[in-house]
Image (spheres, rainbow, N blue to C red):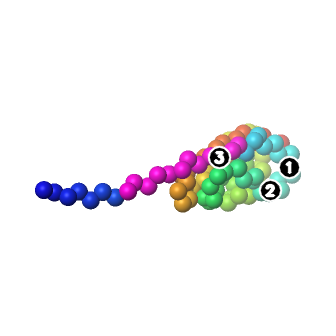
Amino acid sequence: MFKVNRRPVATLIPNIVGSLGNIVVHSNGSPFVLPQPTSNSAGEWTYESSDPYILSITGNVATPIRTGQVTISARQAAFGKHGAGATTTLATVTM
């Protein structure tokens, strides 16, 4: 007879991420801090602009470069028993 050792399978709790809402920037090029989406997880957030020549993002700080529209992607890393999550929003920049 063979004995099979089975390890318990970790169950991830779904990460529930809220919206950033649409962002409208009327700016002279001054950097601003991006809002953090709501979430049921404490995972770290990362942000990305679909066009860094319109809106550049470093960490959670966005810098308007020129007039246009971009999609901002906010991704949250898995943390503890929570899986990863993500959301996107449209940002309109006018200079």
Number of other residues with Cα within 10 Å of mark 3, as a class: few under 14, some 14 to 19, many 20 or more: some
Residue matched to label 3: 17
Q: Contact, CB < 8 Å: mark 2 with mark 1? A: yes
The quarter of the picture where the C terminus appears is top right
Task: Reply yes or no: does residue 10 show up in magenta.
Answer: yes
Secondary structure at badge 3 equals: loop
Secondary structure at badge 1 equals: loop
Q: Amino acid at mark 3?
A: Val
Q: Nearer the viewer, mark 2 or mark 3?
A: 3
Task: Report if residue 50 is visible in the image.
Answer: no
Residue matched to label 1: 27
Report the front residue among 34 and 83: 83
Q: Is residue 1 above or below residue 17?
A: below
At horizontal 72% and vertical 39% (from top left) the residue drawn is: 90
Task: Report if residue 11 is visible in the image.
Answer: yes
Secondary structure at badge 2 equals: strand
Number of other residues with Cα within 10 Å of mark 2, as a class: few under 14, some 14 to 19, many 20 or more: some
Residue 26: x %, y % from top left:
86, 45
Q: Amino acid at mark 1?
A: Ser
Task: Reply yes or no: does residue 79 show up in magenta.
Answer: no
Residue matched to label 2: 32
Q: Amino acid at mark 2?
A: Phe
At horizontal 62% and vertical 46% (from top left) the residue drawn is: 16
Q: Contact, CB < 8 Å: mark 2 with mark 3? A: no
